[in-house]
Amino acid sequence: MDYQELEKKYLDLAGQVVEKAAKRGVLAEAYLTAGEELSIEVRDQQVEALTTARDQGLGLRVIRDHRVGFAFTTDFSPAALDACIEQALANARMATPDEHNCLPARYPGYPALDLWDPEITATPLEKKIELAKEIERQARAYDPRVKITESCSYNDSRYLVALANSQGITAAYHAANCGASTFVVAVENGESQTGFGLAYGLKFKNIDPAKVGREGASKAVRMLGAKRVNTQRAAVVFDPYVATNFLGVIAPALAADAVQKGKSLFRGRVGQQVAAPVINLIDDGCRPDGIASSPFDGEGVPTEHTVLIEKGVLRCFLHNTYTAARDGVRSTGNGARGSFKTTPEVGTTNFYIEAGSRSPEEIIKEIPKGLYVTEVMGMHTANPISGDFSVGATGIWIEKGELTTPVRGVAIAGNIIGLLEAIDAVANDLTFFGATGAPTIRIASMTISG
């Protein structure tokens, strides 16, 4: 598939659909995507599953008298595209008018990003299978107690996006990403513990199978022999994976649509201290190595580097064109689309806590006693409106600045804002898990329930 040629072909197609719809006296926008995905699953050095999938489609949004109509099609024949236009127009007639419904106007330019690694496409399938097998070999070789492979996978995706609207926007880009992961089980004296390793990014050469395999194995092995601890207040350290789990609850609360509906714990807090001064929280749609980077969002608005929380102070929310019109501000380039089948929502791109300057070892060394949390359970039960959470946790006990024995069967509870305000150290190990990232962070004191 030559993506350069496809880009031109799809841009032309999107432009024709918009032109045809606009002749009916509406504002129109065509959002077109095409992509292919590869997924390889390996277990016990055998390929368990190998799937490839392709899809393409066009989503059409029209606005007439402030009413939005939307329809999509996966068939690009002239008759199907005409039917899609008719459907969108019919849907608009039944919609409720809202004066903030609008489409963005043309922009002078977009950030230049390198999102295409030709090696992802050029690497033979056999080599990708071998990479997944090597991850498993490395995990098993790490320690004889690593006995079971739950999953070991490699996947990649290549896609293009073309967008045109009747306000003068015509833009397209193509991108690719790849990743690998493993979940393994370590067994000793009838007890079993799981551990995972993963790596995702824009460059094939950056996936190190040895690192992924050993990471999964070490996480499983270090939890063997885990015990409970008594209920107490102590310092708590979140490893980057756990910190990103909490960001999953914070992200929806920073979307302007949640704020406008009164469903955000940050509502009415702009300009106020909502976190400790060591916290900078950023959404960056044009981060050079970001898996969610793109030159423009799902509406053709340029992506940007948005500082949401700066030195603990809430600066702004994330906007798409609609929420920005409603608040009388400009879009931050966060019109997110899950696919061509949906209209743009507000969503994060590369969302992360900025790294600090000290190593994780340094911030652990200062703790007389505490818990280094490596996994939390039940994060989905956290309340995004009040910010209250209560989650199960496992980790490693800290005694006199050293990691000692594994701990499980404990719970930590609190409020997201209270948690953010209690952070007293941020390490320099910013790690991304997909499009969300965080470094190791330390909370001065929390109740750990045994």
Image (cartoon, rainbow, N blue to C red):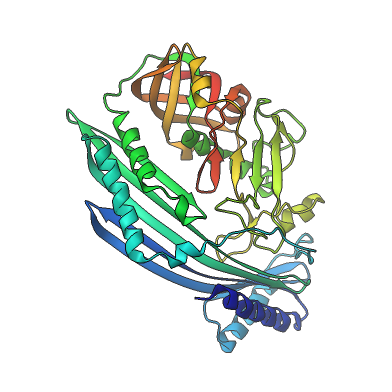
Q: Position of residue 138 (x, y in %)?
A: 29, 43
Seen as rendered, the residue at the extreme left is: 189
Q: Is residue 113 left or right of residue 201?
A: right
Give residue 284's position: percent from left, percent from top.
Answer: 65, 48
The one of 46 and 350 positioned closer to us in this rendering: 46
Q: Nearer the viewer, residue 104 or 231?
A: 104
Tell me: residue 116, above or below residue 323: below
- Vertical arrangement, residue 444 with respect to residue 377, above or below: above
Q: How many marks?
A: 0
Residue under the image location 52 percent in, 14 percent down: 366
- Residue 198, given in percent of the width and then of the height, sits at 41, 45
Residue at 42% from the left image edge and 31% from the top image edge: 374
Q: Is residue 272 above or below residue 405?
A: below
Q: Nearer the viewer, residue 91 or 310?
A: 310
The residue lying furthest to the bottom in this view is: 79
Quadrant of image for the C terminus? top left
Quadrant in the picture for residue 194: top left
User: Residue at the spot x=72%, y=74% of the render?
Assistant: 28
Which residue occupies 33% across, 34% down?
218
Residue 354 appears left or right of 378: right
x, y percent for residue 50: 32, 64
